[in-house]
Image (cartoon, rainbow, N blue to C red):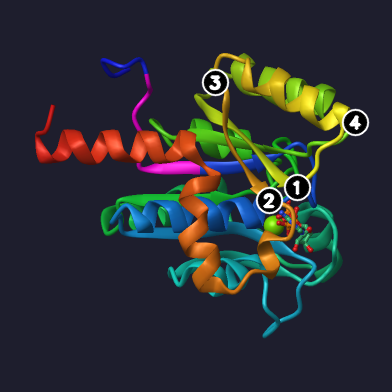
Amino acid sequence: MTESGLATLPAVLIVTGTDTDVGKTVVTSAVVATARAAGRRVTAYKPTQTGVAPGEPGDMAEVERLTGAPTVEGVRLRAPMAPRPAARLEDSRLPTLDEHVARVESLVVCHDLVVVEGAGGLLVELTDDGDTLADLALALPGCAVVVVARSALGTLNHTMLTREALSHRGIRQLGIVLGSWPEQPDVIEQTNREHLAALPEGLLGAVPLGAPRLDPETFRTASPGWLPGLEERLGQRLGQRLGTP
Ligand SMILES: Nc1ncnc2c1ncn2[C@@H]1O[C@H](COP(=O)(O)OP(=O)(O)OP(=O)(O)O)[C@@H](O)[C@H]1O
Ligand SMILES: [Mg+2]
C-alpha cells in the first residue's frame, strides 16, 4: 500500500465478471485505453475465446478497434459455450495453465501492463484439467483482479459471490467496474452502486451505456474519466517511477 492507502497497480490485471455478457470486453477496452492515455505500454490477452469462427472478430479485435492497442488470443473455439465443452465438441486440446502463464509472462516482459480477459465468470474452466481464471490468477503472483458487474437488480448477490470466491483464495481485488451505467439510473441501480462503492476494494468506476458505439477516438479520450479509481492508481505509479513525491 502507498502513503495515501491506495494499492499500486500490478503488471497483470485480470478482468473477470459476475457472468457472461456483463461488459468484460468493454471494460477491458476502457482499462487498456486509460493505461495508454497515462503513457503505459499495454496489451490485452484473452486465454480462451469461444463462439467465434476462424477469421471472425473476437473480443480482442473489439479491444483493438476501441483502443488501438495490440492484443493476443490464446485459443479460439467455434461453439458459443464454456471452453471445456466447446473444445470437446471440436475434439481439440486446450492450452494448459502453464502455457497461459508462460504467454502472459512473455507479454509482461515488453509491456507495462497486461490485461487478461476471462471467459464468462471466475470459475469457468479454461483448461482440460479444469483450471479456472482463479487458478490463472493464483499462478501469476502479484496480479490483481477487476470484477465487472451489472448495475441492475441481482447484481449484489452475484458480485458478493464473486468477491467471496476471490478472497477465499487470497486473490487481490483491485476493484469493481459497472459494465453499463445508464444516464438516468433508477433507485435500484443507484443503491446498488452505492453498496458496491462502499466495499473495501470499492468501485473503480462505471462505463456508460452506449460506450461501445462511440467512435474509437471518443472512447479513448473518455475512458480515464469513466475509471477514476484506476486513473488514480496509474498516476501514483507514474509519480513513483519519476521519483516525484
Ligand atoms: N456500456 C455498454 N453500453 C452498451 N452496450 C454494452 C455496454 N457494455 C457492453 N455492451 C454490449 O453488451 C454485449 C456484451 O458485452 P461484452 O461483450 O463486453 O460482455 P463480456 O462480459 O465480455 O461477454 P463474454 O463473456 O462473451 O466475453 C456486447 O454486445 C456489448 O457491445
Ligand atoms: Mg468478452
CB at disc 4 and ligand 1 closer than 8 Å = no
The prevailing secondary structure element of the residues shown in magenta is loop
- Per the rendered image, the range of residues in magenta is 6-13
Task: State the residue at coordinates (80%, 52%).
Answer: 21
Label 2 – label 4 distance at C-alpha? 17 Å
Give the CA distance from mark 3 to mark 2: 21 Å
In the picture, the quarter occupied by the N terminus is: top left
Sequence-first tag of 3 and 2: 3
Question: Which of the two residues, 197 or 85, is positioned nearer the viewer here?
Answer: 197
Q: Which residue is mark 1?
A: 183
Labels 2 and 1: the sequence-earlier one: 1
Disc 2 and disc 1 in contact, CB within 8 angstroms: yes
Residue 153: assigned label: 4
Tag nearer the camera, 3 or 2: 2
Mark 2, residue position: 208
- Would residue 172 be found to the left or right of residue 41 on screen? right
- Magenta stretch: includes residue 9: yes
Q: Secondary structure at mark 2?
A: strand
Dot placed on the residue nearer the N-terminal end, 2 or 4: 4
The x, y position of residue 187, in whole percent, is: 86, 27
How far apart marks 4 and 3 lie (CA) works out to: 21 Å
- Front in this rendered view, residue 158 or 189: 189
The reply to whether callout 4 and callout 3 are in contact (CB within 8 Å) is no
- 53 part of magenta stretch: no
Q: Earlier in the sequence, mark 1 or mark 4?
A: 4
**Which quadrant of the view contains residue 145?**
top right
Q: Nearer the viewer, mark 3 or mark 1?
A: 1
